[in-house]
């Protein structure tokens, strides 16, 4: 669907930028797991070598174990290079930077200009070329779900502000919100932990100061 209004363009750019960030986070987490595995195996191999020299172990099986561990480390390192984690993360970072810059211009714009549309379409092209279609679908869905949860949470906060201004005790509002969050909603749980009265009072204090 073509986006021709500023609101839709901003929302689409935000979701696209977040999907790239989620994809980068997923790649980094996967790469870090392999790197940690290399570190642990290398440490185990070094410790075993030191123990073998100290205790003078000469059994053939014990002699082969460090070679086996070194082969595992070499195999994992080759697999990391084969998966091109660093290159793929760099592509995602560069695309995310461009989308972030385009989103900033869209937020400062007052109308949809031809130049903004051109940058917007360039950003979408970067998104499409940075991720495979099935991967893009998964992370776009996750980013859009996150944005909906954030908007829902903000709306609940402003509802609390309005109720407080109408004279409703904050303790009653806290009880209602915590009971609503415990029953669940159409999206993921918006409030992962129970809200305290102190949290709301602090937020309302900041609201009044503004």
Image (cartoon, helix red, strand yellow):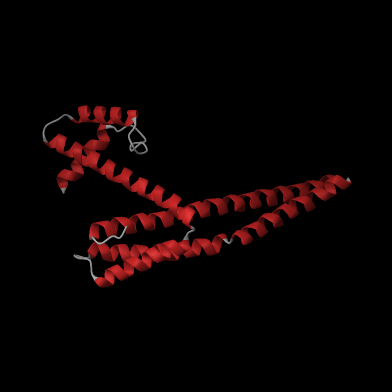
Q: Relative to 29, is 182 on the left or the right?
A: left
Give the percent coordinates (x, y) of residue 33.
58, 49
Q: Nearer the viewer, residue 18 or 128?
A: 128
Q: Which residue, as the protein is rendered here, is positioned at the far front? A: 1
**With respect to residue 142, does 9 lie above or below?**
below
Give the percent coordinates (x, y) of residue 164.
15, 35
Give the percent coordinates (x, y) of residue 170.
20, 31
**With respect to residue 102, does 28 lie above or below?**
above
Dividing the image into 4 quarters, which one contains the N terminus? bottom left
**With respect to residue 202, does 78 lie above or below?**
below
Q: Relative to 148, is 142 on the left or the right?
A: right
Q: Which residue, as the protein is rendered here, is positioned at the far left? A: 166
Q: Relative to 174, is 88 on the left or the right?
A: right
Residue 53 shows up from this direction: no
Q: Which residue, as the protein is rendered here, is positioned at the far bottom? A: 115
Q: Nearer the viewer, residue 144 or 29?
A: 144
Residue drawn at point x = 44 percent, y = 66 percent: 94
């Amino acid at each position: 669907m073509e986006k021709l209004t500023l609101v839709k363009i901003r929302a689409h750019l935000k979701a696209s930028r977040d999907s790239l960030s989620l994809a980068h986070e997923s790649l980094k987490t996967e790469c870090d797991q392999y790197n940690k595995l290399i570190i642990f195996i290398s440490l185990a191999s070094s410790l075993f070598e030191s123990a073998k020299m100290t205790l003078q172990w000469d059994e053939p099986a014990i002699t082969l174990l460090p070679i086996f561990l070194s082969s595992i480390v070499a195999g994992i390192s080759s697999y990391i290079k084969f998966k091109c984690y660093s290159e793929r993360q760099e592509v995602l970072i560069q695309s995310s930077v461009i989308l972030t810059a385009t989103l900033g211009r869209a937020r400062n714009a007052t109308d949809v200009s031809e130049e903004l549309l051109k940058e917007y379409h360039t950003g979408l092209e970067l998104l499409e070329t940075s991720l495979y279609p099935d991967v893009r679908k998964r992370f776009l869905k996750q980013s859009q779900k996150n944005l909906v949860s954030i908007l829902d949470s903000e709306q609940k906060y402003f509802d609390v502000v309005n109720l407080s201004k109408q004279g409703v005790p904050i303790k009653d509002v806290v009880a209602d919100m915590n009971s609503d969050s415990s029953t669940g909603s159409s999206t993921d749980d918006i409030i992962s932990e129970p809200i305290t009265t102190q949290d709301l009072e602090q937020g309302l204090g900041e609201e009044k100061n503004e």
